[in-house]
Every structure is written in C-alpha cells, then in structure tokens.
Amino acid sequence: MNNKIGYLLFLLFAGSTTVVAQNIPMYKNPAEPVEQRVADLLGRMTLEEKMAQLSHLHGHHWCNEHGADLQKLLQTAGDMSYGCVENINLTSADARKSFHAIQKYMIENTRLGIPIITVTESLHGSVHDGSTIFPQSVAVSSAFNTDLAYRMTKSIAAELRSQGVIQTLSPVLDVVRDLRWGRAEETFGEDPWLNSQMGIAEINGYIDGGISPTLKHYGPGGAPLGGLNLASVESGERDVRSIHIKPYEMVIRNTKVKTVMSSYNSWNGIPNSASHFLLTDVLRGEWGFKGIHGVAATPTASRRSKESDGLRAARLKSTTPKDAT
C-alpha cells in the first residue's frame, strides 16, 4: 500500500513548484518528505478507501459505448478514489479523452483526491484500436535482437502516453516448456536466458519512454499440467528457480521495474498469488523488490474478491479515519 501511495503522490504532484502550506494537506505538499506525506495520507484513509486503492475498475464500471460515463462512474465510485482503471475496448482517441475524464474526476471529485493509475495491455502494441501493431513476443525474440526489442517498446510507450496511459501490463516473461499451452505466442520462448535479455530490453524501452511496465506472470506457469491454461505446474524448487522465475530475477536485478503480476495458476497445488515463498521469501526477501505486486485473476474472481470480501467487510467495520489501520 505504501509503495502505491508514494507512486501516486509522485504522479500527481511531481510537477508542482508552489504551495500555500496553510491551505493544503501535508500529503499534497511536494515540499514535504515522501515518507511523511504517505504517512499523513494513510492516516486520513478509512479501511474502505484503502481497499478501493487495491481495486481495479473495469470498463463496464465507468464507460458506455462511447467512452467515459460520469454518471455511471459516480454510481460506482462515489467520492472514493480507486487504484487502477482500464477499458481495452476504447479506441485510441476515446481512450485519451476517457482516461483524462476519470483522472480529473478522481482528483477533483473524491474525498482525498488520489489520482488513479490508468492501465492497458500492449504486448505487441497498444491494444486500443488505431495503434501500431508489432510482432508477437515469440517473433520478436526469434530475431535475437535486444536493441530491436528496446526500440519497439519505447515506440509503443510513446503511443501509450498519447492515449493517457500510465502503466501497461507487459511484457510476459513466462518460460514455455509445454507447447500445448495456449499462451505460448505471448512469450519469448523456452530459454530462460533469452527471455531474461529480451525482458530487460523491453522493460527499459517502456521506462525510457515514460511508461511503467509490469512483469508477468510471476511464478511457474509455462508448463501447466496437460498444457491447460491455469492448471498447476508440478515441479521441484530447482526447476522453478533455474527455469521459471529466473527471467524475473534477472529483470528485477537489472532494471528499475516497479510492478510484478503473479500468475493465475498454482505450483504443486499452492496458488502462486498466495505463495509466501514466491512473493515474500524470494521476490522481496532475496531479490529486494520494493514495488507493487498485482494479482492476475478472472473478472469474476476479481469482482467477487473486491465486492464480497473487501468493500463489504470494510463497510461492516465502519472504520473512521482516526483509527484506520
């Protein structure tokens, strides 16, 4: 939570140069240390607001067929800021207008004015209609040309920025060891070293282009039982470390990536998104990752988790800003 709030504070106030101290909360004051601003903001947030910052608004929550629908957004969000937002069905032109509209709403019409992270997909070009289409990852890696991969994602980043996007859910670093798996073309192939080098190049291209990339899908995923998407991977720790998560380690150690998404499936029956070993012991403990961890989930699972388990529980707690934790 602290990592995300700090990131959002930077996005919103990095360009500010003058502040009337007596009229602005500490968390909005760019002259104050980031750690103090984060602490101040967290102290003002209710439990429900904190849960919303961990939630993702999908297109049907805030858009109609033409783009942003502020009435629908009002019904969904009210005066509460949310963490992330996307709508992959928008055209490039509509994405720019709609993302601007929701960002303006979150800053000006919510209680705390926390900006939202606008997110999209761009595995081989921005997903929004009208964008440049590049080769799939497996085709890019077949060129064995990291400079080409870097220039491709830096070019994609320019289009994403023009569409109002802050973060992209790319690249995919899964190492494929079963070609029956239906997502093989999204990856760089079967070799951990090649995947690592292509991943480093693409991550740096996005970052240098002004976009925050996302490593996915962290955890063993490219060798599911029966080649079935979402099925468990059954293997020992040596294979997981030396094959499946090796590209993530190399990218995290050699770039400034700030977001990692864990995979949908499980390893030896334990969900990767709930693995203390993968997420805490290895990712943060051994590799020193200090960024944001996102969870890959189906829309139904995400909605059920957010509405049933998260916000409902927060409402029952009736937490006030003073005693929120």
Image (spheres, rainbow, N blue to C red):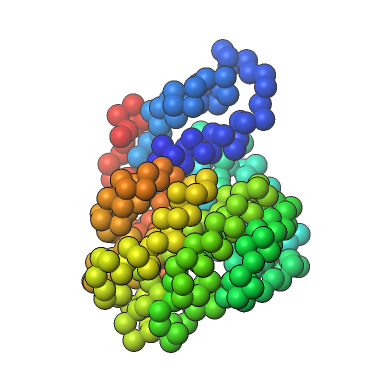
- Name the spot of residue 36 as percent of width and height, x first: 44, 23
x, y (%) of residue 269? 23, 71
Query: Closest to the observer: 308 or 221?
Result: 221
Left or right: residue 252 compared with residue 141: left
The image quadrant where one finds the N terminus is top left
* Residue 204 picture location, percent across and down: 60, 52
Residue 214 horizontal side relative to residue 298, left or right: right
x and y percent of residue 234 in the render? Answer: 26, 76
Residue shown at 40% from the left, 27% from the top? 39
Q: Is residue 83 above or below residue 41?
A: below
Q: Residue 186: in sight, yes or no?
A: yes
**Which quadrant of the view contains residue 88?**
bottom right
Q: Residue at x 55, y 26 (%)?
A: 28
Point out the residue furthest to the top here: 22
Figure check: 98 above or below 216: above
From the viewer's side, name the closer residue of 178 and 100: 178
Taking the spot 30% from the left edge, 57% from the top edge, the residue there is 278
- Please identify the quarter of the rendering in which residue 302 is found: bottom left
The one of 12 and 283 positioned closer to us in this rendering: 283
Relative to 14, say whether 127 is above or below.
below
Residue at 45% of width from left, 85% of height from top? 179
User: Number of callouts in the render?
Assistant: 0
Is residue 143 left or right of 55 when viewed as pictured? right
| Residue 216 visible at all | no
Viewport quadrant of the C terminus: top left
